[in-house]
Image: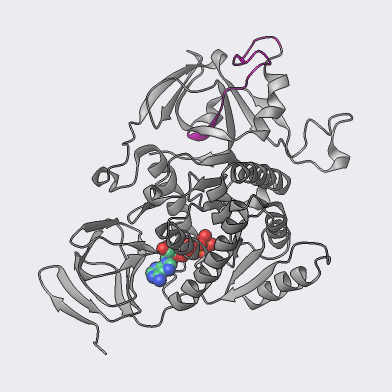
Amino acid sequence: MEASSAAEGEDKKIWTLEKESELRFEVGPDKSFTVVLLEQSAEIFGVELAVNTEYHFSAGAKVAVFTWYGCKLQTTRTAEVLYVAKDTPMLSYVNTHIQLEARRDQALSKLSKGEKAVGPRVLVAGATDSGKSSLCAVLCAYAVRLGRTPTFVDLDVGQGEITIPGTVSAVSLDSGTLSIEERLSLAAPLTFFYGHDSPGENPELFRHMVSRLAECVEQRQANDRDAAAAGTVVNTCGWVDGLGLELLRHCIDALSIDIVLVMGHDKLYAELMADSEALPDDAPPRTVVKLPTSGGVVQRSAQQRRQGRAARVREYFYGAPHAERRASPALTPTLLELRMDSVRVCRVGGTQLSGGLLPVGQAALLGPTRVSMVKPSHDLLHAVLAVCHPVLKPDGTALVPGEEGGLDDAGQEIADCNVAGFVYVTEVDMVGRRLVVMSPCPGDLPSAYLLVGGIRWSE
Ligand SMILES: Nc1ncnc2c1ncn2[C@@H]1O[C@H](COP(=O)(O)OP(=O)(O)OP(=O)(O)O)[C@@H](O)[C@H]1O
């Protein structure tokens, strides 16, 4: 067997990796790192590298370049951590992928005969930093490389891989949506704004949003045979005990999950296995499988998580640090001025009060999924606001704030709808009665209804 070796150059290194090994690196603060595949084949979280192409990674990136058959790589600049590992769980991951493919083939063949069928609905569960997102990325990329169009669902409100933290989202993947430098380069995600970075902040609202997202995913797949056969891959957050486990169970039920992959967590595996064994005889069977966590998965501190969340929001508005090298449409962040009387800022899920503390008759208004209006104030400075889709009246025209039948009627509908995008507040001018917001692209907002939660960001 060929040994891994590194040849020194001025900040450049050549690496010869033997088969089924990987080069792991972590890019330090204010640093950048470049990888080029010189010979043979390699992949990053399932996405293949093109030969002689520079891939750039910026501060905070923690990545593995894996090769099935061996390869020669060149790296430029230094990384905080940089080493070759021969012991990886990729064989178990590819075996899982093969099982999923068999189910996809079965589903496609039934659907082609006009029978009802759906491909595998996989949920990845595990503690924080157990490699859940990385496994989801690998499984999705392998499916896409075979021409499938799986739906990726992200329920990890702490990270918000598809859009921003505080959201639950789904996106249909194809070869145009996978990217080495950004993991996912997304076209039209379906996003619901939960508004907080922990599901524990408003568990009822989280349940509600997951259920709504699940309904929409099911509808989309019902109208698209290939998407139905390709199935779903669901990423979850790492809170897996107490209420966290209850919420995880809700996600499993809401999305009709039939395969749960548990990342190296014996207790969680036993609990979810017991749930599956207790399913009634007439319920669809559910398989629970334990998979090993990669030794390369990096534990992140609370501060690194906060930085990761801020980086996600920044990327939403300004694009990935190396996005300009890609062919995807560029973002054009634009400041917009909004007159306070022409927009309505709403909050979903008011103050959480126990039954005894509620004013008489106010139970419904203060419920965890109820919509209430927020008076613009300096509190909105740096808030990230979700922009709703236009709320339509029965005649098909958009509802305008202040109009008869306006917000109060539209309000609950707002909580049940996916959102069009996000802006963040850069200025609150109480004297001039205006808000200045940053939008990722020029043009009017699609609606005057904005949702606020607890997600904040500033440059
Ligand atoms: N084999 C590997 N080599 C190097 N870094 C890796 C490897 N696998 C995963 N990582 C990195 O480790 C970090 C944690 O992995 P990942 O995000 O997959 O875990 P997670 O369980 O989804 O975390 P969370 O619970 O916070 O969402 C990420 O930055 C990821 O890029």
How many numbered discs sit on the rendered protein? Answer: 0
Task: Name the residue rendered at 62%, 16% in the picture.
Answer: 396
Question: Does 411 appear in magenta?
Answer: no
Q: Quadrant of the C terminus?
A: top left
Where on the picture, by quarter, is residue 128? bottom right
Residue lying at the far front of the rendered structure: 113
Q: Which residues are the magenta region?
A: 382-404
Side of 238 relative to 42 (left or right): right
Task: Name the residue rendered at 21%, 58% in the picture.
Answer: 54
Vertical order, 271 against 433 (above or below): below
Q: Position of residue 336 (x, y in %)?
A: 41, 22
Q: Quadrant of the N terminus?
A: bottom left
Image color mode = one colour
Side of 260 relative to 36 (left or right): right
Vertical order, 135 against 336 (above or below): below
Ligand 1, seen in the image, is in the quarter at: bottom left
Question: Which SS type dominates the magenta stretch?
Answer: loop
Side of 36 relative to 303 (left or right): left
Q: Position of residue 379 (x, y in %)?
A: 55, 30
Question: Does 388 appear in magenta?
Answer: yes
Q: Position of residue 362 (x, y in %)?
A: 84, 30
Task: Name the residue rendered at 54%, 40% in the picture.
Answer: 190
| Residue nearest the observer in this picture, 458 or 404 | 404
Q: Position of residue 449 (x, y in %)?
A: 58, 23
Q: Is residue 297 visible?
A: yes
